[in-house]
Image (cartoon, rainbow, N blue to C red):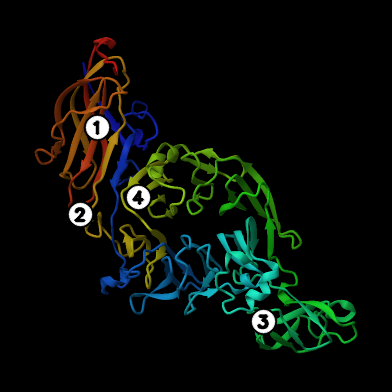
Amino acid sequence: MSRNLEVKVLDGGRLVTDFSSENIGVANYVRKLNWRRFRDEEIRREGWVLFKPNAAGADTQATFDGVETVLRLAELVRPNGERVIVGASRTKIKKFDTGTGLWATIGSGYSALGLRWQVVTMNGYLVLNNGVDLMVTYRVEDATVTPIYELREVGIASAKRITEYNGFLFIGNITEIKADQLNTWMNGATPYGIPGASIVNVLPYAVANSEFGEPRKWAPIFSVTMAAASTSIVLPFPSTAFVAGVTRVGVINGGPNDGTLGGDTAHPDGILVTAVVGATITLEVTTDTGITYPRTVQVTRWTDINTLVGRYLLQGDGSEITGMLALQNLLCIYRKTGIYTARYTGDVDNPFVFTPRYSGPNVPVFGDCIANVNGDYHLYPGTGQRFYKFDGVSWPATHPVTDDAGTIFFSGVLATDECFCIDHPLTKEIWFCNPYRVLAYDYETTGGTCSEMDAVIGAAAFAQRPNSTDQWFILAVGNIVFTYALVNGATQITTWLRNGVAATPRFKSGLSSFGDQANEKDLLNYTPVLASDSPDTEATVQIYATYNPSVAPVAQLSPAEIIPSPAGENFVAMLFRAIYFQDEIVITDTRDRDVRFAMRIYELDRIGAGGVNRQSSG
């Protein structure tokens, strides 16, 4: 007796690559390429067009650089609403200039050995870090980027990781200049360049934080020996922290009764610096004349007397910090052998409390590949080629949806590859990008789903279209920037082509016995139901069959069935006998059109022959 079996997208729709085919089922996929889930349908993934904020302008708007590949894109927004799109390649940082319609260089000369750029946006600043050069910042009103000079002035050469937490810039895995080498280096020809390995120490377990809301401020303090009371103080090296006529300082141990100069009735906000010449600063008043000299004093900005800037050694087993990202009210600090969390206390004397939360191997492999999913948990590819979630409280656990599809991400990937992830808020997906493909995790669908995209994405960002209110998701492929064809705004982009070229969507189901592993079935016909406005979309159908799941299923249609045939007809008549079946649909239509897939219908006839016809794998 034959029966129809309808398999709807909502019946499964999971991408499962890491299980045996017969355990995946007909409602799930072993391959789901260039589709994405939308409600109760699989829809053809949107394409992208050249990045052209000035619609009437030239295509050159999309060319970031003539040679170098884009490694980072970000949007910077000032508190007053002004904004700019910034990108970075290995050695250059550029912004998109809406006036010229070109990418203008705002920083250059960075090390070709630098890591993939990390970015942090906070309080109108964009902070960029490549782990080798001194970090830089940028504001919308700036003509060029500005190195964070004060980091170097407090002895920090570089850091491998940066993030923002609770209004503070945090850095981790720090390289510092040796204390006995700092003054010599800072008096050299390139104090803000890259120090050589012989004069630095690497503290892979160290973290530090800036002043609140001020990523450029790191509270430098200078020890100076004074021979006598004076208005002139000679610092160990020239500093950017002091600006004549602007900066007010406190001179610790240089005031009355061996106290601090500044803070008195006449100078409640410190002592004004009236001149800066090289390493010499001049104060509006002299240090106290009633105390004994020579003496050592400490000079710092008055606002840094009670600073929240700090440096912390999370030594533990000494393993290096590989990633940092905020989660709700915590900062999660990922190491090669475990996880710490930090919590802001608000106590000036002890502003952050660090707690070892987990010790073990289930940690991120790639520091740029840690996703914050709806603020609920962090999701990341981890050791052992598994995907994990960490909620800040419980130990990391495997994340079933992405872990089941993990082969898509991990295949061919090395630990040295520059993998990263990005939240695509318009499609409600996290894109996990490696040098070969993208694994997209849809976090909006109940239970979540995954899909694969055969594109090499070098960078991406969610941004507002310059001179418009349209919200764009922009991405880079090589040295060219594109706009994803899904827009939140008035000016829609409608295309399923990638810069005019059609991608090939395909999916392949799991191997299924349709609930009966003992008996043969006759597959009489098969109908893919496309829920599109384009019912005559060109596609091919292939049916595979086997008697034993340990034997590779064999294609039954030779050649694959082309649909629709005739026009408007997706019904495929056939007669194949087996125990297990599998189907594959490939959209071969290269026209720029929407394609939506809803379900497949099988007509099956059960043959009551028992298990005697089940062939062995031998």
Q: Amino acid at mark 2?
A: Asp
Q: Amino acid at mark 1?
A: Asp
| Dot in front, 4 or 3 | 4
Q: Position of residue 73 (x, y in %)?
A: 42, 64
Name the N-terminal-most of marks 1 and 4: 4
| Dot in front, 3 or 2 | 3
Residue at the outermost front position = 198
Q: Is residue 142 left or right of residue 392?
A: left
| Disc number placed over residue 298 in the picture, else none | none
Q: Position of residue 374 (x, y in %)?
A: 50, 50
| Dot in front, 1 or 3 | 3
| Dot in front, 1 or 2 | 1
The residue carrying mark 2 is 592
Quadrant in which the N terminus is drawn? top left
Name the N-terminal-most of marks 2 and 4: 4
Q: Residue at x 53, y 62 (%)?
A: 131
Q: Residue 15's image quarter?
A: top left
The residue carrying mark 3 is 242
Quadrant in which the C terminus is drawn? top left
| Disc number placed over residue 583 in the picture, else none | 1
Task: Answer few, some or many: residues within 10 Å of disc 3's Cα (few below 14, many 20 plus, some between 14 and 19).
Answer: some
The residue carrying mark 4 is 436
Task: Answer few, some or many: residues within 10 Å of disc 1's Cα (few below 14, many 20 plus, some between 14 and 19).
Answer: many
| Dot in front, 1 or 4 | 4
Asked whether 154 or 85 is in front, the reply is 154
Q: Amino acid at mark 3?
A: Phe
Q: Residue 202's image quarter?
A: bottom right
Q: How much space separates mark 3 and mark 2, taking CA atoms?
A: 60 Å
